[in-house]
Structures are given as structure tokens and as C-alpha cells.
Image (tube, helix red, strand yellow):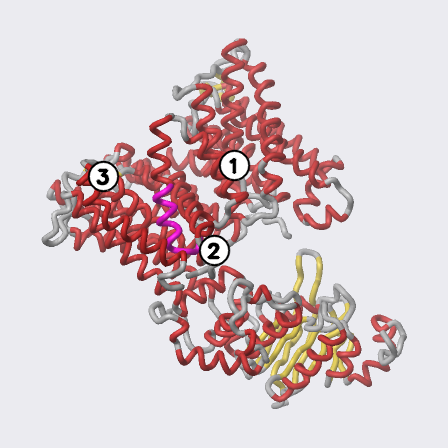
Amino acid sequence: MLLFIEQILNGLQLGIMLFLMSAGLTLIFGIMRIINLAHGSFYMIGAYVAATVASYTGSFLLGLLAALPAAALVGMLVEVIVFRKLYDREHLDQVLATFGLILFFNELTRIIWGRQPLFMDVPSWLPGTVELIPGAPYPAYRLAIIVVGIVVALCLYLLFTRTRLGMQIRAGAANREMITALGVNIKLLNTLVFGLGTLLAGLAGVMAGPILAVEAGMGESILIMTFVVIVIGGIGSIRGAMIAALLVGLVDTLGRFLLPELLRLFLPAATADGAGISLASMSVYILMAAILIWRPRGLFPVQG
Amino acid sequence: MAGLKSRSGILLLLAVLFFVLLPPVSSLLGEQYLISFFSRILIYALAAVSLDLILGYAGMVSLGHAAFFGMGAYGVGFLAFHFQESTPFLFGIEGTDNALLSWPFAMVFSATLAAVIGALSLRTSGVYFIMITLAFAQMLYYLFVSLEAYGGDDGLSLWSRNTLGPLDLSDDTVFYYVCMAALSAFLFISWRLVHSRFGQVIRGIRENELRMQTLGYATWRYQLVCFIIAGAGAGLAGALMANQTEFVSPGLMHWTHSGEILVMVLLGGMGTLFGPVLGATVFLLMEDILAAYTEHWMVFLGPFLIFIVLFARRGLYGLIVKGEKHGD
Amino acid sequence: MTDLLLQAKSLRKAFGAVQATHNVSLDIRKGEIHALIGPNGAGKTTLIKQLSGEILSDSGEIWFKGNNIASLPMHRRALLGIGRSFQITSVFDELSVRENIALAVQAHQGHSFRFWKPVNDDKRLQQATSLALRQCGLEERAAEVAVSLSHGEKRQLDVGMVLAGNPDLLLLDEPMAGMGPGGTMKMTELIQGLKNQASILLIEHDMQAVFALADRITVLVYGEVLVTGTPDEIRNHPEVQSAYLGNRNPDAAA
């Protein structure tokens, strides 16, 4: 039972990371209608900058504070140099150009930092484990991730519902032509939204640093899941991203935990484990397929 | 075809001459490895042409095409493995290393997969379609990584190449000409396809799917069939690749591999069938030459790709035969 | 009642909180030109989309040739005999005029899962295409790529493609849009000439053309049918005059 709760918390933590990645991406897609395969690269940049600064200064916090503006700045730079020319292009062109960006960033990372993965320590000021339920210690760091995610979600909620910038972003997501006609500086808005999106990705990268290996190509594995989240949640919808992210995080984590167990009821242990692992690796995609059959545009598609 | 006197005709003739004469000339020059290297080019050319069918003609941007390539390779791999181990495959099917059995099997395997993925993905369009084809392809990648019985991430080795009737495929030159024959056959079939009634429908769907529906076409069905045919082509390429390297691994299905094939099609020229052959050749040559100078050659490929997308959209084939009617 | 080609009953369509089509009933008699007018945002295009199948109505029935087609997809309705032309000309830009018409003809010659014979050698197709080309007057431009045609010629091609399928019902969405007086006259003649081939439902803002062509007019306001009647009845209807025509005599210069 305790193990089960631990897995649920792990699932939530994965869900939060996915939320940070997908919120940014769905915003970028929702407003600018641009498909960005290179979103994972900003996750990677966040992780690398944080890991480097943290290892020089010994402070996780400094690493975080350095990584966030770095991700945002690189993002905005890329938006101005590359993305501005892609807005009116076909999706294919965007796919290819952003694929080019991935190749560039991955290789650049290898050039600067080499091929060996970097390591990041969990912040020293966090206790090792926390006993949420007496007798069941859970890594404090992972809990911190969940807390950070909730805080970010709340901030985004306030941003979108209470500020003018937020309303402009939401309006832009629903009707791009209209918002230009209303005199909003769409170029600036685009750059800011892009920067916000990449900042969130960078944040996810920093938080992933101590848990996963910081290496070139790390962005791509989470990117695929991010796409699954967005497709399930509905493009352009932050709410959809949140719900879908938690759903995907839970299904993936619990799947890996439960499926082998479940199959042991029917199959010999060795086969059950093998089949269980294989099925678990496919579980979120099967979920995506099932939802698509029911709702081809995701759970909460934004009209327009 | 615009006739042999036109630029596209001359280019085609030169290409055929080049590929036909490569093995004897390489042997004369003592550069045997070129035969093997160009076999790889021919195989990727086949994969790229199959992608061009759905990308350049049907307008479907699929980032999962490598999955069909990989499945074709594993089709051959599974049968070879069970042949080597003398154990039966699924449903009592015996393993085999006979190309006449395993290559069609590989193609059917890929085509079936394309049917399933296509049917699910074509319920969507635009960005959703791109992301979904990507996701499904990755799903297969992770699935195959988890298949410990077949090597998982480390892959599967074949003891030898398949046998193809009286032909000895372990002879690199023979294998080269078999690859060339496969590519030529697929090019010919694709060419007829693209100029047939089916081809016109596909082209119409690419331009304006809604209009096609109001004209009376069940567009989804045509897109699916095109997707399946392309999948089968990629499967054949995969089967050949498994033989070329005598090794299969999940990496063949990784979406970045799809990206590379996509680049080949773009580089050569989308929607031209012959452009992708040129694209595959140039891409793989570039990769080989540049890699000799620096191990970080990919850092140049990225911006180069962006440059092509922004400024040289029609690809090499388009640049060479500029001004001629598109779609020949 | 037997000379009714299409009968739409109580159609409803909502987009979120907006009721775009509210309990609309409409019928089209065989051989008539029926115009659909109303202020912008009245839901005219939404209604056409529901008739052609691009949008599925939330509720209601659409009877066409004795069948309720309300749940049929667009391509099935097209094959049953409903043709549609779009507000914005949508021809296949990169194909030639001949290829455009051929695609329209091909749809009605059975399925197109034919992979081998080059389309240019397909006599059955090419003969029917040549005929259709002659009928829409674009025979001389047959080899031109569609994107190089003038705006008026593109419109001609657009309508030609719809006619190539020999539809029983034509849904024309603002065929005069963007045309000068010369083009408008030509289009008016074309539509008049079609009377014997097909029944027509016409959305148009050009009031002169509407009153010259229409046998009956339906006025749509805020997604509801205000009134259906002959041009005279509509011209003199007080509510129509205030809601739409602005109390002016439409025969005077617009």
C-alpha cells in the first residue's frame, strides 16, 4: 500500500514536469500556430546551465537563478532569428527547421560540455526524505517538485485570468487575426510568450537535473511525452495540459508498477515481467490512441 | 516524362549510368568499400522515395516513417533469429533466411502497421497528425527496446545475409544490384501510381482536402492507402538494410532517424520521386565526407537545414530542373 | 409536394454558447433558383455548410431525393447530387485547368483506386472531361495551370468543376464576390442558363442579381428564418425592409 502511494507521488511528480513542458509548448502552439520540435532543447539548456553554475558555486539555487533567464533569453533570441520567418510557413517547414535546431543545439552541447553526462546534486538545504505518512519516507526533492509545479500552475492561472498580458495571450490563442486588429503589438507578444514557454521548459530541465542524467539529447525523450500530453489535452489549452499531464504521469508510472504485477496473475513470472514492461512502455500511447478515437481534437480543444 | 532531351531526362540518364557503372569502376579503382557504401545509399533512397509519396504527393507530414523502416528490418530479423535458433516464430511460423519469404513478410509487416497507425492518425490533421505519427513511432521504439528476447537496445545480429534464389547476396556486388533493382522497381511503381487516377486524387487532397470532399471523394480512404503503400516501401528498404548490415536495432525506428530521411527528401526535392534519390546520395556523401573532418559535423547540418528550408525549398532537383513542369 | 428537391426541417446548430442556426426550415423546389439573403453573421454560410455536410447539424432533418441525409458525410452527399461552390475560389492551383475538371469528373466515375493506367491515356475520363470543359467555356485554357488564370476565369473553373458532376442541387456561396459589373453580368447569365440543369440555392449580397435571378427568396436573420417568399413579397415585406434592405427600393442604384 505504501509502495502504491509512493508510486502515485512519483506519477504526480512526472506529471508536473510534463505540465511545465507542455504548458509552454501548447501556449506557443496555441498563439503562434507553430510546431516547435526544439522545445526539448530549452529543457536541456536549463539543465546544463544549472548543473554548470551549481557545480562552480556549490549552490542549487544559484544554478536555478542562472538557468531560468538563460533559457528564456536563448528562447527569445531563437524566436527573433528563426521563428519569425516561420510563422507563415507550412507545418512541414516548421518541423524541418526546428529539427535543424535540435541537431544544432545537441551538437553544440557536446562541443561545449563533452559527451559525458553532468551530475547535479539535490539542494543541500532540503531534508533527504520527508515522512508524509508516518513510516513512509518519501524523497523531499520530489515533493518539492510537486510543490513548485502547483505554485507555477497557480501563477499561470493568475497571469491568464487577472492580468492584461494574460488576457491578450488568451485572446491571441483563440483568434489570432482579431488580436492584431485590436492593435496589440503581436511581434512583441509572440516573443514574450515564446520566452515564457522556454522559461518553463528550462525550469523543468533544472528540476530534472538531479533526478535524470544531464546529457545531449535529454530533451527529446521528454518531448515525445510532451506531445502526447498536448494531443490528449487539446492544443492551446493550459487546463488541458494540466489534466493531461497528470493523467499521463500517473498512467506511465503506475503502469510500470502495476502491469507486471497484474500479468503475473495470468502468466508465468518471467513472461509476465517482460510483457508487463513492454506494455507499460506503450501505455501512454495506447491511452492517447483511445482518447483520440473518442475526441480527435483532445479533451479541451481551443476553438479557432 | 518530359523526354530524354530535357534536363530531368539527362539527369535521370546520368544517374542510371552512374549507379550501373559504380561497381565495376570501383573494383577497377580498387575502392571496393564504395560498393557497400552506395548500397546503403540505394537503400536510403528507397526509404526516401517511399516517404516522398506521402510527403511530397499526399502532403502528409509524418515523423514516424522510420518506424516502418525499422519494422521491415525487424521482420527479416525475427525470421532470421528463429531460423538461427531453430525455434518457431509466432503462430507456428518457422524462421527462415530465404529472402523470397522474409522480404515479402517484412513488407506485409510494415504495411499492416502502417494501416493501423494510419487509421488512427488520419482521424486528425495538421499538427495533431504530425505529433501523433511521431508518438506512435516512438512507442514502437520503446517497445522494441523492451523486447529483451530479441536483443532489446543492443539489437539483433544476423549470421549471414538472406538467400535470394540462385543469387549470392553475401557478394557485395550482387547485393548492390539487387538493391538497385528494388529501388528501380519501386520507382517505376510509384511513377505509375502518381500518374494514375489514384495519384491525381492524392494530389488533389494535398492541395485542398475540403474541395475534394465536396467533389465526392472519401479522402480519408485514399490517404490511408497511400500511407500503407509508403509503409510497404519503407519496409522493403528496412529488409534490405537488415541484410546490408546483418544487424537490426531499435535505433532504426527512432524518430530522429525519421528526421534524417525527411531531410533527404527535402534536400533532394519533394514531390519529384527522383529528387529523394539525389537527396539520399548527397546527404550520405556529405555525412561521410564531413565526418572525416570533424566529429561535430552535425553542428553545421542544423543551420544548413534551416537555410534550405528558408531559402532553397525546392531542393536540389528543383534547382537543377528549374522551369520544367512540376510533377514529372 | 413531389416537386420538392430538398427539404430541411428544424435545423439547429450551436457553437458553444452561440446558436448559429435556430430551428431553420427551408425547402427547394425542382428547377427553382432559391436565394438566401440576410445581414452578415446571420448564419447563411453555416446553413450551407450543414446542407453540404461540412458541418453536422445538432438536430433536424434534411430530406433530399427521398432520403434523410442529415448524418451523411460530405462526399456521400456530393455523390448523391449536391454540388457546392465556395465563397473564396478554391480550384487546385498547381494543376492544369483540364486536370481540375478531370478530378471533378473522375469522382463520378466510380472509385479511384486505380493505380496503373496513366490518367492522360484514360479515354473514358478524358472524353467526359473535354465535354465538361466545353460546357464551362474554358476549352482554350485547358493546358494552363490554374494559378495563372484571371480571377473571373478561376470563378468559371470553380463553377465548371461543380457542374462537371451533374448535380441536381447547386449550393452557390456568393458567386459574384469580388467581381466587377462585367463579371457579375456573365455570372448572372451563367446561373440563369443553369436553370434547366439543376436547382440552385444561392447566397448573395448583390441585391440586383438576387432580385433578377431568384424565383423565391429566404431571409435569414440571427440564425432564424424571417420569411420565405417571391421577390415581390420580399421586396414589400416591412420587416425585411427594415432589417436588411434599409427601407430602400432595391431596384434603385445600390
Asked if the residue at tag 3 contacts the one at tag 2, i.e. Cβ–Cβ closer than 8 Å, the answer is no
Q: Is residue A100 above or below residue C105?
A: above
Q: Residue furthest bottom?
A: C2
Q: Position of residue A74 (x, y in %)?
A: 58, 27
Q: Residues within 10 Å of mark 2 (few under 14, many from 20)?
A: many
Q: Residue furthest right?
A: C247
Image mark 3: chain = B
Q: Is residue A110 above or below residue C135?
A: above
Task: Quickly name the residue at label 2.
Answer: B59
On-image quarter of the C terminus of chain B: bottom left
* Residue closer to the observer: B70 or A205: B70
Q: Residues within 10 Å of mark 1 (few under 14, many from 20)?
A: many
Q: CA distance from mark 3 to mark 1?
A: 42 Å
Task: Quickly name the residue at label 3.
Answer: B245
Mark seen at residue C6 = none
SS state under label 2 = loop
Q: Position of residue B296 (x, y in %)?
A: 40, 26
Tell me which amino acid carries mark 1.
Answer: Leu
**How would you classify the magenta stretch by its main secondary structure?**
helix
Tell me which amino acid carries mark 3.
Answer: Thr
Identify the residue at horizontal 43%, vertical 18% (top origin).
Answer: A118
Task: Quickly name the residue at label 1.
Answer: A246
Q: Magenta residues, as a range?
A: B270-282
Q: Residues within 10 Å of mark 3 (few under 14, many from 20)?
A: some
User: In which quarter of the view is residue B70 placed?
Assistant: top left
Q: CA distance from mark 2 to mark 3?
A: 32 Å
Is any atom of residue A269 visible in this view?
no
Q: Is residue A200 above or below residue C186?
A: above
SS state under label 3 = helix
